[in-house]
Image (cartoon, grey):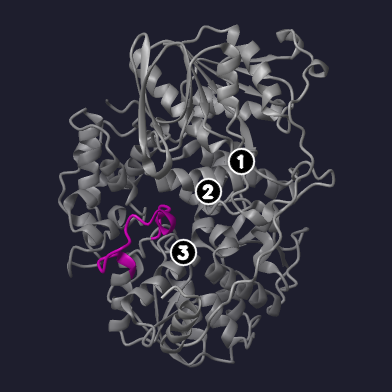
Amino acid sequence: MDIIACIKRVPDTSEADVVKIDPSQKDIEKDRLAFKINDWDEYVLEAAVQLKEKLGGTLTAVTIGPKEWDEVLRRALAMGADSAIRIDQDVSADDPHIVAIILDKVIRRLPYDLVLFGAQSEDFGSGHLGAMVAEILGIPHATLVINLEAEEKKIHVQRELEAGTLQSYTIDLPALLTIHTGINQPRYISMGGIRRAMQKELQVMSLSDLGLSLDALTPMVKLEEMRLPPKGKEAELITGAPEETAGQLAKILKDAGIF
Amino acid sequence: MTLTNFRYGDVIHRCFRCGYCKFPINWMDVNNCPAYARFRMETYSCGGRLWLTRAWLEGEIEWSDHLADILYSCTACKNCEVKCPLSFNIDILNMMIAAKSEMVERGEIPSAAKEFLENIQRQGNPYGTSREKRDEWMEGTGIEAYQGQEYLYYVGCVGSYDTRGQETARLLGKVLQKAGVSFGVLGNDENCDGNEVRNLGEETLFEMLAEDNVAQFQGLGVQKIVTLSPHSYNAMKNDYPGFNGVFDVLHYTQLLQELIRNGGLDVSGGYNAKVTYHDPCFLGRWNEEYDAPRAILRAIPGVQFVEMARNRNGALCCGGGGGNFYLDLLGGSEDSPARRRVREACETGANVLAVACPNCLTMLEDAVKAEGLENKLTVRDISEIVGEACVIK
């Protein structure tokens, strides 16, 4: 089975207070942030590698971004991807539709039975991209996939909905899936593995190599402004001996109508 | 699947599980391997782990989450190495680390270990807290950035980020200031020392950290280093020379002992308490420094010093080594080594349990709370005791 995994690099914003809006008010300040692979994409790679280990075939990892984005591709190569392609263009703040048009051009050049995306990204979180690419490619897709089992010509998937409700589908290949966290336990990628992956091929392409130009790609939506949420009411810290604080806490809960 | 890179395939069979690896100083019991003490199953002792590793090596058992937990519950405390009577004892802990390395290369490690290592890759500390916050501990202390002073004061991850660790980092800084020691810190440019990374079997990440730190120290002209943590001390003293990083490395207790002895630090303010001392593994068994902390405590007026039954190279590990202060594979039981250790400290009649390691400090302080011993026993780092004796507020 030939698989294409589309992955991205995101800032580590697990601590809310490190996030600051830059003067353009259309992006966050990234200079001093650490970056990582998008959380969902770790599960994408693990699912892809498990399928490849089971069924054989090829695994190609694709990303769109500047040179620093090679690091997520190196992780993919260390995990077991055969090849990796980076489209050298910063589209991180662009409308997902533009990203989808570019990915469509890349994917069409490659052999594939299955295209995998993360269900969403940690930074912009639109969750649109996979479905858009499937539409442009004209192949079936399923989003929020929490379980998958592949045969030669079809794939059985389960989607996770509200309250853990599961939907099962059998989809003809080629198909596109967006993968949810929890589908597997992504393995640890050792630094030794990443160093060894430096030997593997990493192809860099430009938009013009794909017959595209950024000017010709018109966004369907345009970002107007980014801002941080207003600060809420401050937390109340109750201090003192447990026999006193327990009573105070009980009173607060009672006054709030919780008891 | 068999192991591919395991370096000790030709000697691992020599462990016949005599059980000495579980002993303390004498034969008082068999609970001095922290993981064995916690689980009381042979599989968790060094001998048991070696036999399991061998079975894994020879394809008799498959890798499993449980096997990974058993191997990673080793705290690298070195009790086994010190107590094993066989000549191959110098390698038994390395065998454990090599088995962990094999798991690292296959990507199959406990999820907490994965998180620990990825956090260090990304933010240079196991907590995953931003690198930009590494210097928050020193706010308002007046401690200077390192720029050619006599000593680089290397604080380490626990001292930089853990709330309790930060208190000791600050106090040690103040003690050094009071003694007039010329020193500076790296602040946000400080990176993980890598000691636990090595013990978790992530060799390449450790090499990268060691190479980067050595290059940084040399670039700044560092010659002498004083560390808060025995873990940093161990890596910098014993491992960094292998990366051309030869520095004059001291654990802070060694520097304070010298300062007190030559009159550079006045501890006449005293400290009135009955104090016992817990040897941190990376100062004690790993580096055989048992005397400096004791000499400091004995030099402080008012300190009534008592030993626990297990001490020096027979000390029971707090259970925090090998990354276990974060992985917490040994927690959650009254048999957890830290809880056993604070009960032992109480038996001496001491009201203060002195430590010389921020990892031990957090582990044992939590254990005091879990045991409900707050009214009987306080855990204090030696830097805090000296701080009080120097009348630092």
Kindly indicate whether the residues beneath marks 1 and 3 are on one polypeptide chain. Answer: yes
Q: Main secondary structure of the magenta part?
A: loop
B250 horizontally vs B88: left or right? right
Q: Give the CA distance from mark 1 to mark 2.
A: 10 Å
- Residue type pointed to by label 1: Glu
Q: Subunit of mark 1?
A: B
- State the residue in front, A227 or B67: A227
Structural crowding at the residue carrying mark 2, measured as other residues with C-alpha within 10 Å and reported as few (<14), some (14–19) or many (≥20)? many
Q: Which residue is mark 1?
A: B211
User: Which comes sooner in the sequence, label 3 or label 2?
Assistant: 2
Structural crowding at the residue carrying mark 1, measured as other residues with C-alpha within 10 Å and reported as few (<14), some (14–19) or many (≥20)? some
For the view shown, which residue lies furthest in the front direction?
A257
Provide the residue span drawn in magenta. Answer: B320-338
Element type at marker 2? Answer: loop
- State the residue in front, A138 or A78: A138
Kindly indicate whether the residues beneath marks 3 and 2 are on one polypeptide chain. Answer: yes
Image point 58% across, 61% down: which residue? B161
- Residue type pointed to by label 3: Asn
Expressed as whole percent of the image width and height from the top left, the position of residue A232 reads 66, 65
Instruction: Work out whether B134 lies above or below B295.
Output: above
Q: Which residue is mark 2?
A: B194
Element type at marker 3? Answer: helix
Expressed as whole percent of the image width and height from the top left, the position of residue A5 reads 52, 21
Q: Quadrant of the N terminus of chain B?
A: top left
Image point 41% across, 48% down: which residue? B112
Q: Which residue is mark 3?
A: B359
